[in-house]
Amino acid sequence: MKSTGHADLPLHTGTVPRWLADRMRNLGGLIVESLLLHYGRQEVLRRLADPLWFQSFGAVLGMDWHSSGITTSVLYALKRAVNPRAREFGLCVCGGRGKYSRRTPEELAWLGERTGLDADALIRASRLCAKTDNTAVQDGFQLYQHNFIVSADGAWTVVQQGMNPASKTARRYHWCSHNLRSFCEEPHTGVTGENLGRILNLTDRDAAPTRSALLELTAQPPASVEKEIRLIRNALEKDGTLPAAAQSDRNPVMPERHDVRAQDVDLKRLGAVLALAHGSRPGDFESLLLTPGLGPRTLQSLCLVSEVIHGTPSRFRDPARFSFAHGGKDGHPFPVPVRIYDESIRILGDAVEKAKLGYTEKSACIRRLHAAAKEIESRCDPRADFDAALAREKAHSRGWGGRTVSG
């Protein structure tokens, strides 16, 4: 699951209403529990360390598909869902936003006392992650959120976010202890944020000579260092503006606009989901379709939830598509269909509980939803009529209990 990349994240203010926050907790906890049942703790950490999966996860939970607020709301939801069951899950979410981020060392020390984990090593890792992104990587973003997710075997993932008030943008950083060999040389699994041009990144492998030179500079007289600084400043003034950093195909750009548009989603993949949900054969998913109250619209949501659980990294290049599961709290792409959301939670919860008792049929059906959608994609090109799909969602919004932050 290791990936690298960055994306533009508009800096949004506001709060998540309680009716959505509780549902995010419930569905987010069930998705984590499903990942644990199928793939184990290490895979949960790897997923959280992937910036594109994280953005897709937030979108399927009904948060704004492109907003920086996904980071705060998703991690808060996971902390509420995971920590009360920390011994059962073998996972614990520490830290948070603002003052809660500064309590991370205390939480890790408390965790160490009760579990036997090496708290000193975990606290050191937490501080180094924060220090590296705030100091060694000077990109104009000041950290204001830090979450440290640790497993029972001492593995961990860090998700932290910084803001740039002047540009009204945010950048999210992801770390994972899996295969981490150095905090000073290319430690990130991914960086999500706005590309503001060339940055100082002392963690790059090619920056090793620079790190060595900086250590040598600390031993030089201040007057000598000041002379070198003047020479560098003069050279930069003559050079002019620096070129922008190169983009890659793992670097999605989240626009400032709120509405979801056709270019934001893979229409073939969305079309496969819609075709499966609204035209599936009863025999394909019998145990699901016999669930009282389950209709095509809930099947659509479950198909996207299934992809978040069972999809591979390449499936998350268009996070906006996952907002077609449960909409967004600001009404984009459509209001949150509360009744559908509750059905998704109920059915996934029932599947998880039965799977823990050894009855895996319903859980296997949910897993097959993603496989079936991929099969449809491979057999044909079922491109979604984006405008028609959006119009259908909005036309049925009232009947599905559509809600936004404003009502």
Image: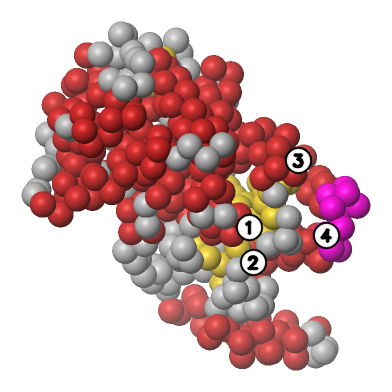
- The Cα–Cα distance between marks 4 and 1, rounded to whole angstroms, is 15 Å
On screen, residue 335 above or below 366: above
Say which label, 4 or 2, has the lower sequence index: 4
Say which label, 4 or 1, has the lower sequence index: 4
Can you tell which of label 3 and label 2 is closer to the viewer? 2
- The Cα–Cα distance between marks 3 and 4, rounded to whole angstroms, is 21 Å
Q: Amino acid at mark 3?
A: Tyr
Which residue is painted at 23% across and 44% down in the image?
373
- The Cα–Cα distance between marks 1 and 3, rounded to whole angstroms, is 17 Å
Can you tell which of label 4 and label 2 is closer to the viewer? 4
From the image, tell me which residue sits under label 1: 157
Label 3–label 4 contact, CB within 8 A: no
From the image, tell me which residue sits under label 4: 117
- The Cα–Cα distance between marks 3 and 2, rounded to whole angstroms, is 22 Å
From the image, tell me which residue sits under label 2: 177
Label 4–label 1 contact, CB within 8 A: no
On screen, residue 200 above or below 251: below
Label 4–label 2 contact, CB within 8 A: no
Which residue is painted at 13% across and 26% down in the image?
388
Q: Amino acid at mark 4?
A: Leu
Residue 211 percent across, percent down from the top left: 66, 84
Residue 361 percent across, percent down from the top left: 40, 38
- Residues shaded magenta: 110-120
Which residue is painted at 60% across and 74% down in the image?
179
Whether residue 193 is visible here, answered yes or no, is: no
On screen, residue 150 above or below 400: below
Report helix, strand or loop for mark 1.
Answer: strand
